[in-house]
Image: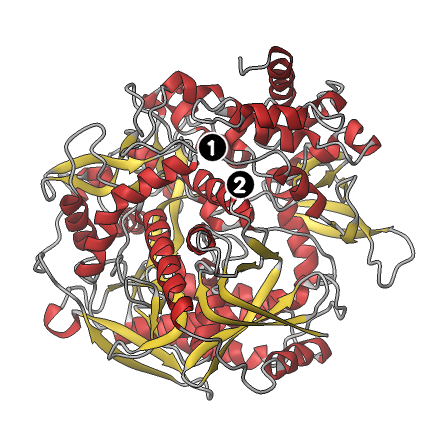
Amino acid sequence: MLNVTVRIQRFNPDTDSAPNYQEFKVKAEPTDRVLDALNSIKWYQDGSLTYRRSCAHGVCGSDAMRINGVNRLACKVLMRDVGSNVTIEPLIGFGVIKDLVVDMEPFFAQFRSVLPFLVNEDAPPQRERLQSIEDRERYDDTTKCILCAACTTSCPSFWADEQFVGPAAIVNAHRFIFDSRDKGTGERLDILNDREGVWRCRTIFNCTEACPREIRITKAIGEVKKAILSGKRA
Amino acid sequence: MIHTHTYDAIVVGGGGAGMMSAIYLSRDSRIRTAVISKLYPTRSHTGAAQGGIGAALGNLEEDHPEWHAFDTVKGSDYLGDQDAIETMCREAVDVIIELEHMGLPFSRTPDGKIAQRPFGGHTHHYGQGPVRRSCYAADRTGHMILQTLYQNCIKNGVEFFDEFQVVDVMIAEGRCTGVIAYEVATGDLHIFNAKAVNFATGGFGRIFSISSNAHANTGDGPAVALRRGIPLEDMEFYQFHPTGIYKMGILITEGVRGEGGVLRNDHGERFMERYAPTMKDLASRDVVARAIYTELREGRGINGKRYVYLDATHLGSEVIEKKLPDIADFCRTYLGVDPVKEPMPIQPTAHYAMGGIPTDVDGRVLRDAQNNVLPGMYAAGETACVSVHGANRLGTNSLLDLVVFGRRSGLAMAKFCHETDLGPVPPNPTAEVAAEFERLLVSDKGEPAARLRDELQDIMMDNVGIFREGPGIQVAVDKVKELKERYKTVVVMDKGKRFNTDLLEAWELKNLLDLAQVTAVSALNRTESRGAHLREDFPKRDDVEWLKHTLVSLDSNDDVSIDYKPVTITKFQPKERVY
């Protein structure tokens, strides 16, 4: 058993004038998730501690937060890896609704702005559209996105300019731009060629390091930039 | 504060079934539709499904919907309704093609078609051997379905109420006329008056302690329906997936065995050869989960502990990294085990409710043993019991159920909306739920909800799990009653209105308690063994007495009553089940 001090940024706009930090002591197995520690605090110490969670194994994207200063999913970090003092704070860049819960509406608005769906108005064939294994592989990496916002909220360019569409939206645009079945590439590249599009990216790589799905985000953004310059998918 | 909204159609739940029905509703511009979801839709548990979705495409070898239907009937231990199963397996091919056209990035065969892999219980020529029927996108098929459906909802401009918890259903003048929802961010109540409501709220695997299910899977839809007098069907049939990560319960897809992985006990023996000589590790889930438990009981768990190995080390890193990348990631993250080099420690994990809100093949809710319809109310997905899964669901058939019956319910609702006017809102419809929340908020001398939930999950796991017997189930029934008494003074520590998940978790616990109660009582009542329901005191299937569906009801005094309805049999007469 580990004895861990968990320091959490608390803020309830209804009752607090500013965010503050509160410390909790928890006992944890080394293989417990940080989410398990949060749950034990919420369930048995302070029920008002508020955060989002659902699947608890890194596929639903609910529990992205800052853990010891870096964006992580609380359900994908084990207690043995955070030390005996861990600090947990909400994601940076979106308004805090309460404690670790941030306003995700601007994030989903960014996502919606890049035509995040297959565009192909041709009459479909009777059976599936064919796609070679190589063509399918071309956009495989960016299909893994779970929209957790860990990348976008780790991006200094986004912190400086919240109008920037952000890495997550570009990842989701990439997923269609490089899909051989898609016909919306031109329109999507025009959107991303906007002043708040891909050119705000300064190749800092924070997004790639933050991604819990290990998507090579900076590489994907680079490929979109190249597609804009060449006018076509590479 | 109370807000009122009016729509033609309301879909409750933003997972696979809910969004599929919303897409169909949204294609009719005259119908105003909204999806109400307690989570952002992309957080729904459909996204955790891994191994594939079943359809007899025949892309790699001969296959037919009739074979798929036979396998599903046999898998159901003959409790599934065969007309519904035929519908599902027939429409499977078309709906998979439709998902591909919507953009779903399936893995591909060398000639560019949708790739398919073997899966438990899926056979060619009516049981002769495994067939490649599971259409997959690596090992994140559910994720890709959820994303694709969400993308298409955005494309079609579907209206969402995200992070709104539906807490009651309105029934007036013999029909469903809408729902009451709690806005998580503000604590406000909302009345949604509608012509048609679809409950697609997912499962309730959180009644068990070792579960593959999300924290959110608390059965809110079936519990709300149950408390409003709608019976639930076949609640005693709960599936334990054979391969969950030891102690955590996180799902390890059957696709691992589909790709050639095998189960081994402490002696290194591939023990499934003894239990299922033909299908071996690809027997149906009830058979494999029971075999694992038997190995554990007889002392052949690894080092005498409560787990066995799932061995994929012979598959090679190429197969694992390309076809099972998420599994590899889970094992490395949570176990420190690299499945390329070491076997995975697994134990069965609570996974899927075969039972739920009774419906016909158009998702219409059936309110009694005579199959009378409750007009305006629909259910689809794991929430519903059509019944296509009977006593045991085959792997890949849940994703299929979501999209086939999500689509059918959406179409049926659209038609119904054109034929009917808006029904009345009952007088003061928020009073009951407002009083319940108020009671939870003022209580200050009881126990935290979490303690009751922990005790509930443990007793259900121990006594209403894979192996069941009368006296043990009775202990669980009594324990749930005791927990319900203690629930009356449960304490919510957060007293605020804003994003009060403490309050919601306490409310969700009530749902778990009600569903656990009817699950345990139904399990006690059924004195035979069939599919996932194994009674050690009644080890044989009894078709004379028990080839029938259970309907369980809960009255306002918390008393349970049981009724039955017949199973629909068309082509396949019940016979002994051997894999």
Report the side of A217 relative to A157 (left or right): left
Disc 2 residue type (three-letter): Val
Along the line of sight, the residue nearer the viewer: B565 or B325: B565
Position of A23 relative to A224 (above/below):
below
Pointer 1 local density, CA inside 10 Å: few below 14, some 14–19, many at least 20:
many
Which label sits on residue A203?
A: none
Q: Which residue is mark 2?
A: A59
Q: Quadrant of residue B308?
A: top left
- Return the x and y of residue B484 as percentages of the image width and height: 52, 78
* Residue A214 seen in this snapshot: no
**Which residue is at 40% across, 54% downward?**
B350
Task: Provide the secondary structure element on which disc 2 rests.
Answer: loop
Query: What chain does badge 2 belong to?
Result: A
The chain ID associated with circle 1 is B
In the rendered image, which residue does mark 1 sit on?
Answer: B326
Q: Quadrant of residue B378?
A: bottom left
User: Please, is residue A91 above or below residue B449 in the view?
Assistant: above
- Furthest residue in direction right, as rendered: A17
